[in-house]
């Protein structure tokens, strides 16, 4: 098991650089999430803001006219749902960044932009998640 602490110049225990970076990211994470949420709110309509606050999702109309629901309260895995004409869920998609730690609201806004600007490309990139309805 790798060491997580070294001794500093005075002989006191000090975290290794790897652990220091992890601790710093954990400390800054709530602030980053808050900033991303505030920034993301700028791109939402009043109706979208209301549904996010009340129900934990936002509805988006794709560039090809289809409707999608992005759930903001369940994480980013499989959170994009394709809706029928009557509002029922007919499929799920999963499109998020895997490698880098970033606020989840960055992913939600990126998903929204991708659907609104180039729906067909989003569908090519996004993985089908769960059973098809």
Image (cartoon, rainbow, N blue to C red):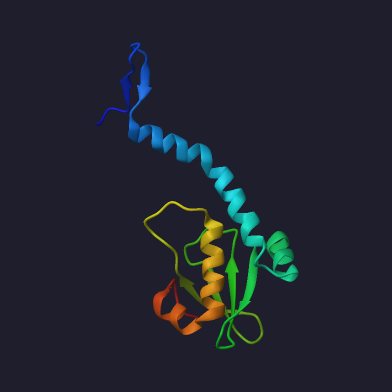
Q: What percent of the width, then of the height, locates residue 38?
A: 65, 55
In the rendered view, tell whether residue 6 sits above or below residue 69.
above
Q: Position of residue 71 (x, y in %)?
A: 59, 65
Residue at x 52% of width, y 58% of height: 75
Q: Is residue 95 above or below residue 21?
A: below
Q: Nearer the viewer, residue 133 or 95?
A: 95
Residue lying furthest left in this view? 1
Q: Residue furthest top?
A: 10
Residue at the image point whose x is 40% and y is 54% from the top: 100
Q: Is residue 118 left or right of residue 37?
A: left
Please give left or right for residue 81 compared with residue 8 in the image.
right
Residue lying furthest front: 9
Residue 25's place in the image compared with 103, above or below, is above
Which residue corresponds to the image point at 56% horizontal and 71% vertical from the top-left? 112
Residue name at image x 55 percent, y 88 percent: 64
Residue 33: x %, y % from top left: 57, 50
Query: Residue 59 sits in which quadrant?
Result: bottom right
Q: How many marks?
A: 0
Image location (x, y in percent) of residue 111: 52, 70
- The N terminus: image quadrant: top left
Quick check: can you spot residue 16?
yes
- 45 lies left or right of 4: right
Q: Is residue 90 visible?
A: no
């Amino acid at each position: 098991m790798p060491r997580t602490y070294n001794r500093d110049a005075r002989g006191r225990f000090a975290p290794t650089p790897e652990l220091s970076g992890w601790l710093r990211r954990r400390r800054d994470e709530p602030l980053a999430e808050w900033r991303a949420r505030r920034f993301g709110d700028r791109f939402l309509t009043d109706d979208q803001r209301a549904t996010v606050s009340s129900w934990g999702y936002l509805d988006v109309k794709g560039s090809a006219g289809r409707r999608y629901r992005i759930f903001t309260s369940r994480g980013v895995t499989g959170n994009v749902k394709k809706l029928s004409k009557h509002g029922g869920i007919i499929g799920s998609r999963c499109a998020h960044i895997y490698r880098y730690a970033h606020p989840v609201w960055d992913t939600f806004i990126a998903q929204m932009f991708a659907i609104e600007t180039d729906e067909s490309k989003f569908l090519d990139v996004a993985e089908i998640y769960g059973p098809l309805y």
